[in-house]
Image: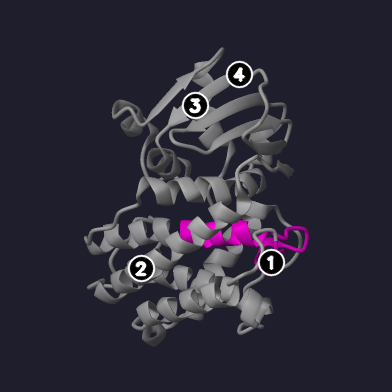
């Protein structure tokens, strides 16, 4: 799996992502405090609202600890052996929600607010390409700070939506926020999340044009994926044009593809437009 950088200004985009995260943290904290029933079903079928909140808390704890070293007991959540990336993340997610008991879950809003601020404070002034130690991803994966910040923003926005759906509270994901997640997190996370079994023997090049940017070339070739930002001209099998929020929600399986197509949020073209649904089928969502 490989990732190739594009021509966007990494410093400016990273600062925009930090600003978006700084604005999202208090929204998420308030949502967690206002959720009336932590035992209610959430937008994640197998998790309650409290489970999703605990998962978000674990995300903030993990990424903050990458710089503060607050959490050291990785043996309690890391799976044994070397499974696939998706298998590993699925196992970690299942264990990590147990880090927060009933009493801790009642204070998740405060926890997220504190750890979110600590993460932003600890990473202030660091270059976007600064490596981040992430043992939950495995020894072979070391994302950059830009990717880590975009991923924390992604987890906050998407699981905020899951909590809000279960709590019946309002929650929005704006186009600029979604655009930053797609540009900062997805170029790294999409190749890692490739379903290798489904990609066996596949050779498809997608031109993914998010309206207003970014533009990603996603090439899946026999169990590997390469994502390139602002790639030079080349031949594509399928061109996908999408609004940022629509694509993000479809990519992470929060909204059905048919509904977004009906609303004009996603359109497919190119030599083989019928291949567009294969992209979300090939890229897993743990």
Q: Position of residue 106 (x, y in %)?
A: 34, 82
Alpha carbons under labels 4 and 3: distance apart: 10 Å
Q: Which residues are magenta?
A: 130-155
Q: Position of residue 249 (x, y in %)?
A: 40, 44
Residue 151 picture quarter: bottom right
* Residue 127 can be seen in this image: yes
Does dot 1 land on a helix, a strand or a loop? loop
Disc ID at residue 28: 2
| Residue where numbered disc 1 is placed | 132
Q: As rendered, which of 81 and 65 lies closer to the eye?
A: 65
Q: Residue furthest bottom?
A: 103
Direction from residue 264 to residue 66 in the image, left or right: right
Does dot 3 land on a helix, a strand or a loop? strand
Q: How many marks?
A: 4
Q: As rendered, which of 281 and 45 lies closer to the eye?
A: 281
Label 1 with label 3: CB-CB less than 8 Å: no
Does dot 2 land on a helix, a strand or a loop? helix
Disc ID at residue 237: 4
Alpha carbons under labels 3 and 2: distance apart: 31 Å
Q: Residue at x 21, y 60 (%)?
A: 168
Q: Position of residue 52 (x, y in %)?
A: 41, 66
Please name which of the two marks, 4 or 1, marks the residue nearer to the observer: 1
Disc ID at residue 240: 3
Q: Earlier in the sequence, mark 4 or mark 1?
A: 1
Q: Residue at x 64, y 25 (%)?
A: 205
């Amino acid at each position: 799996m490989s990732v190739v950088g594009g021509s966007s200004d990494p410093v400016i985009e990273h600062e925009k992502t930090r600003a978006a995260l700084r604005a999202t943290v208090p929204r998420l904290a308030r949502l967690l405090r206002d959720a009336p029933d932590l035992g209610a079903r959430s937008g994640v079928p197998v998790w309650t609202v409290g489970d999703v909140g605990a998962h978000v808390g674990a995300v903030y704890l993990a990424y903050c600890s990458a710089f503060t070293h607050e959490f050291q007991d990785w043996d309690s959540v890391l799976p044994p052996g070397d499974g696939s990336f998706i298998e590993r993340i699925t196992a970690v997610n299942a264990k990590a929600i147990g880090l927060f008991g009933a009493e801790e879950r009642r204070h998740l809003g405060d926890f997220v607010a504190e750890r979110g601020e600590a993460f932003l404070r600890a990473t202030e002034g660091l270059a976007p390409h600064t490596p981040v130690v992430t043992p939950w991803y495995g020894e072979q994966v070391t994302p950059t700070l830009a990717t880590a910040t975009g991923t924390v923003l992604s987890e906050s926005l998407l699981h905020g939506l899951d909590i809000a759906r279960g709590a019946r509270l309002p929650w929005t994901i704006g186009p600029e926020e979604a655009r930053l997640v797609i540009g900062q997190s997805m170029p790294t996370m999409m190749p890692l999340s490739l379903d290798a079994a489904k990609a066996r023997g596949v050779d498809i090049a997608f031109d993914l044009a998010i309206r207003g940017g970014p533009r990603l070339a996603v090439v899946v070739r026999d169990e590997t994926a390469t994502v390139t930002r602002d790639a030079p001209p080349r031949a594509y099998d399928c061109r996908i044009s999408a609004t940022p929020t629509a694509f993000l929600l479809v990519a992470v399986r929060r909204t059905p593809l048919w509904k977004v197509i009906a609303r004009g949020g996603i359109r497919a073209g190119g030599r083989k437009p019928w291949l567009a649904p294969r992209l979300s089928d090939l890229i897993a969502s743990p």
